[in-house]
Image (cartoon, grey):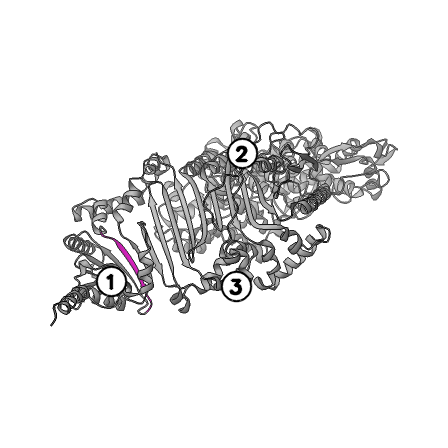
Amino acid sequence: MQTNIDPGWAWSEYEPAGDDWNIRTAAHLLRRSGFGASRQELDAAVAAGPIATVERLFDSTAESAAFQSQMRSVASSSLATGNVKQLSAWWAYRMLDTPAQLLEKLTLFWHGHFATSAAKVEDAELMYNQNVLLRRFALGRFPELVLQIARDPAVLIYLDSATNRKAHPNENFAREIMELFCLGEGNYQEEDIRELARCFTGWEVKRKKFRFNRYQHDTGAKSVLGETGKFGGEDGVRIVVNHDAAPRFVASRLVRFFVFDEPQATSELLLPLVKQLEADQMNVGPVVKRILSSNLFYSSQAVGRKVKSPVEVAIGFLRCLEGSTDAFRLADQMQQLGQGLFYPPSVKGWDGGRTWINSSTLLGRSNLIRELLESEKTRFGKTTLADYLKANDIGDADRLVEFLEELLFAVPIPAAAKDRIKQLAGNMSDNRKLVEAVHAICSLPEFQLA
Amino acid sequence: MKPSVLMISALFCLTAALPAQERSAADLLPETTVVYAEITNPPELISTIFDHPLRQKIEALDQYKQAVRTDGYRGFLTGRKFVEIQLGMEWREALETLTAKGVYFGADKTTGGVAVLIRAEDSQSLDLFLTKLLAIIQLGENPDRIKEGDYRETPAYELNKTMFAVVDDWLLITNKSETGKSVLDRLIDGSGESLADRPNFVAAKSARKADTAWGFADLESLRNAGVARKFFVGESKNPAVELLVGGILDVLQETTQATAALNATVDGLSLSFSVPMKSEWVSEQREFFFGPGQSGVGPELPDTVETLFTFSAYRDVSEMWLRAGDLFDENINDGLAEADANLTTFFSGKDFGEDILGSLTPQIGFIATKQSFAGILPVPTIKLPQFALVMDLREPESMTRELRRTFQSMIGFFNVIGAMEGRPQLEMDMLKLDNGAQLVTSTYIPENGEEGSTDASILFNFSPSVGFVGSRFVVASTDRFAKELVTSKTTTGGPSANTKVSLNAGMLQSVLDENREQLISQNMLSDGNSREEAETAIGLLLEFVGYFKDASINLKTEDGQVSLRFGIQVQGD
């Protein structure tokens, strides 16, 4: 597929012709760059056009001071209990409610990239601090983000680097920085791991804070990735992120996250993005903007070419229908489907793509939607599903199917499936039938695609 | 015939064949009635509820105003208005007229049905009501759903498997035709054996006070019929439940009847249950509950400031612990045995059940008060009440040292585990007070730089401490509370009871209010509410709690009866 893609065309700015920029293209953008959008948000995006809509995604003032204060207050209450599950609920609530959707989506991306699990860290405050750090640097310079993460106590604990002594340098930490965070496999030697580990000696966590213990630091000369010197940890990070492979590694991850799951983007396809990263000190924001504004992003190569993650299924479903629910239960459900917030399964994070789907998770996703629909705590537009649909002038089954398809689906629903849904919905007067119809539509295979 | 015989015969005829309006509900219900309940003055109850000062406060709430604007409620009001027009009177007047002389309920063992008897102000009112009700049903979507018939020339009706009939000023509603016929026979004939002829019922009723509602249950018959089996099983399967109600479970297995009384006044509500009790009904393994001669009473508790909750009970915990083999199943006993072994080690080899628990008298007190953080740092984000167990030692001279040592070991143990898990450490101190009291306290030490925090961990609610003064032994969650308890006086002379529980609603409101921000945050997360919605919801919760003064539970044994009383007092104007 990709051999035919001209990189020049791929990353050039998308200029829609006629009514190419419509509800469905806007929904595609807001689904990929965030967690989905309501009808009102989509209408506003269509009216504003693709350029302005993308610009808005990068508006650093999207979250008001009041909202940020509220989120800090709720986080503080969650932290007071010391329970990380409370924090998971807090983050689910934030994802639903924040107007800064791209920032939140990227925070989730980096959370999976610099995977750190609360199951091992066991400290809600440390996990929260990491989450704040990720959000702060999500759209900034990658080297700065890596340096901050490398010194993050939660990461150090997770990678068994809470103490790192010169007599026994922690090679695990050094390996993960190169392999999983910055370069990928095949771009370093075992010797580089050993030498990089020496750079990080003396880095430790004491009383939940990062500390440099100079007595445990190996002050000798090290040779890392072709550079030699009396390097410390900061130097080690600099050397790694300055490696040629780093921009390609980052670009590849971003393309996989925002554009398509498979096949892996070729070096040729990634080259324009790599050059941009190199030229711009590995600044992530502009590259993301270019991706979201690109021809490739809006092409058939991208639309409907990703499998929704559990978070995208759950948060997306609610967000598109202006929903709210019990955040504790929501976080729990996402965890049961394999994506627990603050609980990535391993240092590799979540594999994503096809691995989200098997017979068990498919059933689980259907059950999640049903549970959301039937929960007493779930509201749509602060009211019942029936009243919400009425308020949006959804008076018949045809209109219902069209409404849901535009909001929730990246690909068209087959005609036969539409007919079945319409039959289920009946004359729209019975709330139970409405629930059945919405549940049925969200159980379709097409619903799993983003 | 002699005049006396004539008179007696006439009297018999008079009483044996009283017209319906001169009979009580107990005269009309079958003798085999096993459950009976009555509200003899419903208009008074209606007035207590609807004229209560709280009603105005509730109606002034925004949430109430919103609730009455919903389509559902408006529909209800429309329906009610329609009925009022049909009846020619307002709903309240209609309800009071219909139930003027009482509402009565009976469940009959023989026929297996229930009967509700409603006595109206007079037969004319009742006839009018019935006529109008039938007319309303005729106007409905399905007028044929009401079936008409008669029994002994008395018209009877059936609607959705519920039967009803009117005789004089009595309205009978029942779910079984046999039950209905049984009651109607007495209504029509004015005679027949009835509940009122049962000696135990008569005796129980004679002891009835001027309660708003009263009830009677033939527990023996219910037990034999297998009704509510779980209620009479006698097993608790849980040490906590055993401690709370173990003795009552024994009594319920044997006692013959129960009475209940509900009192509703402008000051509050109380519900009492009473069952006869005999010493031999309480098994040996449950003597820990009521004590010898079933005369055990809980202790008078020390006076405390800003009291939130108190629990005072007679429980010989040592006896219960030693009898665990007879009281609980294998799983629980395995757990208790393991706990016993560990605790024995903890207490330097002294048998936990016999020596440690046995050193305590069977009077146990538990007190919780609002915790003040004035002048104390760091301050935790979540502010919990402080609480303590208050006990008496049988041999304070020997046990004080033992318990003090054990407490020191326990704090050391907590510190070791806490260090492994990265938690703050406890620092110990010992104090001797002027009144001879001894305190052993421990306080969490904050990390450097966090001493002045006002957003500290929940751990900083606690400074576990023990106190000794005379025979009093206190285990408290905070050092300040331990000190308060070993220096405070005890107001004596209050009514004694086996178990007494009280909750101060005003103090509860204050504690919740202190944690308002946390409650709001939790509400946002658990209900998906916005900040504004959560503030409103929590505000309503606090407002609602503020409507109450206190709640209480009392368990007493006296005069061959076990009585359990629940009470709630509300705020007045």
Mark 2 lies on a secondary structure that is: loop
Numbered range of the magenta stretch: B101-109
Callouts 1 and 2 close, C-beta under 8 Å:
no
Mark 3 lies on a secondary structure that is: loop
Viewer-nearest of labels 3 and 1?
3
Q: Residue furthest bottom?
A: B1
Give the chain of mark 2: A
In depth, the one of A250 and A74 nearer the eye is A74
Q: Residue furthest right?
A: A220
Q: Which residue does the numbered mark 1 point to in the structure image? A: B27
Residue type, numbered disc 3: Ser
Viewer-nearest of labels 1 and 2?
1
Is B326 on the left-hand or right-hand side of A117? left
How far from the left and from the top, in percent, is residue B519?
A: 51, 37
The residues bearing labels 3 and 2 have C-alpha atoms spaced at a distance of 88 Å
Q: Which residue does the numbered mark 2 point to in the structure image? A: A15
Give the chain of mark 3: B
Q: From this viewpoint, is residue A292 visible? A: no
* Badge 3 and badge 1 in a common chain: yes
Residue type, numbered disc 1: Asp
Residue type, numbered disc 2: Glu
Mark 1 lies on a secondary structure that is: helix
How far from the left and from the top, in percent, is residue A328?
A: 54, 45
Callouts 3 and 2 close, C-beta under 8 Å:
no
User: Residue at horizontal 55%, vertical 28%?
Assistant: A59
* Badge 3 and badge 2 in a common chain: no
Is A94 on the left-hand or right-hand side of A180? left
Give the chain of mark 1: B
Q: Which residue does the numbered mark 3 point to in the structure image? A: B283
Q: Is residue A159 above or below residue B434?
A: below
